[in-house]
Image: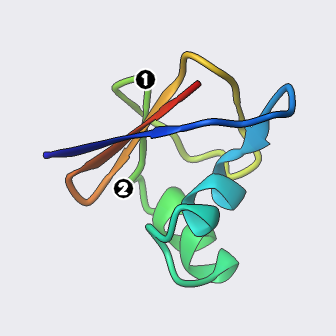
Amino acid sequence: MEQRQVKITTEFIKLDALLKFEGLTGTGGEAKERIQDGEVLVNGETCTMRGRKIRPGDTVSLDGVTLKVV
């Protein structure tokens, strides 16, 4: 499993935007679909809310890649 750190300079980033920004999905539409299908874990739990606010300290996992937001 690959782990990456993602530094954000704002208070939060939306889940779908993070997946697209980090290249885990090719488009926002793909991010939306994969989130709604329950493929994405936030802090180890399935998340189906694409607008969920991801803040420093959160982890997001998809396809064997875990992003740690700092």
Quarter of the image where one finds residue 27: bottom right
In the rendered view, tell whether residue 48 sits above or below residue 35: above
Q: Amino acid at mark 2?
A: Glu
* For residue 68, side relative to residue 57 (left or right): left
Identify the residue at horizontal 86%, vertical 33% (top origin): 10
Name the spot of residue 41 as percent of width and height, x first: 39, 39
Residue bearing mark 2: 39
Name the spot of residue 4 as percent of width and height, x first: 37, 42
Count of numbered circles in the view: 2
Identify the residue at horizontal 76%, vertical 47% (top origin): 51
Quarter of the image where one finds residue 30: bottom right
Helix, strand or loop at label 1? It is loop
* For residue 1, side relative to residue 11 (left or right): left
Identify the residue at horizontal 55%, vertical 16% (top origin): 57
Identify the residue at horizontal 68%, vertical 76% (top origin): 28
For the residues marked 1 and 2, what is the alpha-carbon distance in whole angstroms? 13 Å
Q: Nearer the viewer, residue 62 or 68?
A: 68
In the rendered view, tell whether residue 29 sits above or below residue 14: below
Residue bearing mark 1: 43
Q: Amino acid at mark 1?
A: Asn
* Circle 1 Cα neighbour tier, 10 Å, few/some/many (<14 / 14–19 / ≥20): some
Q: Are marks 1 and 2 in contact (CB under 8 Å)?
A: no
